[in-house]
Amino acid sequence: MKSKILLIAAGLVLTAQAYANNDDSCGPWAASGKWVMYQAAVSDGFQHTGRCELKIKDGTATGQCVMSNGLDVAVTGPVTVNKNCSASISLGFDVPNGGPHIDSDFNVQLTRDREAFAGQFINTFGVVGLSNGVRR
């Protein structure tokens, strides 16, 4: 009888540990879904804010961004999520009317429930800022 109780207890402990490890880890799937992302550029002379609606699927983000400087562009790029729930989002877009191509690289941290993130970005021209997002 004691051995059965010990076996059941050991099984419960192993199950709890497996669940806890599963709950705390992320992977490529963790960012999949629809997101609203906000940015605030803080570089001298280049301050602006932005709002993007993104869809992330199979490691790729696609969507639309509207900036306070009047820019309204489609964006696309790869998304990588690490086991510790840190993530990289690289969004590229072309400025309309013959403007330059701009790449923005976001380094963010997903929350434990994977429903939001916060972090920073830097773009092609060295403009830096803060970013956050929430799952829709």
Image (cartoon, rainbow, N blue to C red):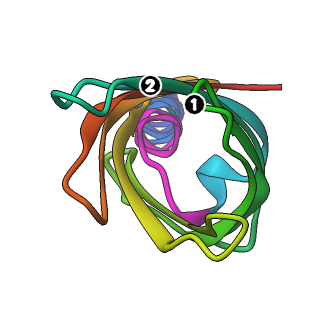
Q: Label 1 to label 2, Cα distance in Å?
A: 6 Å
Residue corresponding to mark 1: 69
Question: What's the residue type where badge 2 is placed?
Answer: His
- Amino acid type, label 1: Asn
- Decide which of tag 1 and tag 2 comes sooner along the chain: 2
Q: Secondary structure at mark 1?
A: loop
- In the rendered image, residue 135, in percent from the top left (x then y), is placed at 73, 28
Camera-side residue: 62 or 22? 62
Q: Nearer the viewer, residue 99 or 65?
A: 99
The C terminus - image quarter: top right
Vertical position of residue 56 compared to residue 78: above or below = above
Q: Is residue 44 left or right of residue 66?
A: left
Q: 16 or 42: which is nearer to us?
A: 42
The 10 Å Cα crowd at callout 1, few under 14, some 14 to 19, many 20 or more, is: few
- The picture quadrant where one finds residue 35 is top right
Q: Which stretch appears magenta?
A: 17-28
Residue 92 position by quadrant: bottom right
Q: Tell me residue 82's x, y (percent).
A: 37, 59
Numbered disc total: 2
Residue 7 vertical placement versus 60 (above, below): above
Q: What secondary structure prevails in the magenta region?
A: helix
In terms of secondary structure, where does tag 2 sit? Answer: strand
> Image height check: is 86 above or below 97?
above
Q: Which residue is mark 2?
A: 48
Q: Residues within 10 Å of mark 2 (few under 14, many from 20)?
A: some
Residue 115 shows in the view: yes
Q: Is residue 2 visible?
A: no
